[in-house]
Image (cartoon, helix red, strand yellow):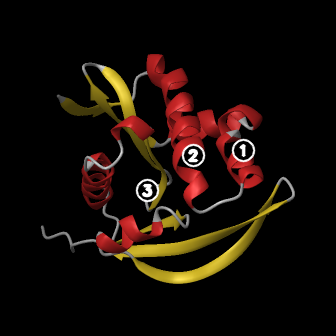
Amino acid sequence: MYLIRDYQETDFSSLELIYHDAVMEQGRQSYSDKQVSLWASFPYLYPTDFRTLVQTGYTRVMACNRIPVAFATLYPDNHLALLYVLAGHAGRGLAGQLCDDIEQEAHRRGVACLCTDASLLSRPVFEQRGYRLIKQEQVEKGGQQFTRFIMEKSLPVQTI
């Protein structure tokens, strides 16, 4: 059984592994081996940045039998910064459930428009959720070029 819950400090190493596994297993569908290797190493090459995102942001964890298998982070309030699912649990709607949770929290915080930086892999997931493409850009990380899609979704207007 899958349950969404708040991030706990004891989850940190699991989230590093989920991130790494998701990129390594699913990234090869759209990226070169060098790109995948670099992307997957983000939590280890930039541990302070990864820790700051996870701990400072609103991070939700999807657990199966109390073991983290997916997570999402809202940081800052208008930006879905991280969304990763362990490869063995992909395709079960977990990313969508986490997106629902993050979108509800952003709405609760008064955000009218939620943004994300989507990869080639995640762009279709976000398009299905009503995000629209703002722009496509090329970014360089560690000597590798990556295509990134800046996307946004209008959230329902809050009524008082």
Q: Is residue 132 above or below residue 50?
A: below
- Image check: 107 left or right of 133? left
Provide residue 29's location: percent of width, then percent of height. 55, 58
Q: Residue at x 21, y 74 (%)?
A: 157
Q: Residues within 10 Å of mark 1 (few under 14, many from 20)?
A: some
Q: Which mark is residue 23?
A: 2
Seen from this angle, which residue lies furthest right? 143
Mark 3 / mark 1, whichever is N-terminal = 1
Label 2 is placed on what type of residue? Val
Question: Toward which corner of the image does residue 50 lie, by quadrant?
Answer: top right
Does residue 100 appear to the left or right of 142 in the view shown? left
Name the residue carrying label 3. 77
Tell me the element at label 2.
helix
Task: Name the amino acid type tagged 3.
Answer: Asp
Q: Residue 3 placed where, x, y %? A: 21, 32
Instruction: Give percent across and percent down for residue 73.
Output: 44, 46
Residue in the picture at 47% in, 20% down: 9
Residue 130 visible, this orientation: yes
Residue 37 tag number: 1
Rounded to the nearest angstrom, the CA distance separating label 3 from label 1 is 29 Å
Q: Label 1 is placed on what type of residue?
A: Ser
Residue that lies at the very extreme toward the left in this rendered image: 160
Is residue 59 visible to the viewer in this orientation of the structure?
no
Identity of the residue drawn at 31% across and 54% down:
99
Instruction: Please state, as top left, top right, bottom left or bottom right, where the C terminus lies in the image.
Output: bottom left
The image shows residue 56, relative to residue 66, as above or below, that is: below
How many labels were placed on the picture?
3
In x, y percent, where is residue 19? 54, 39
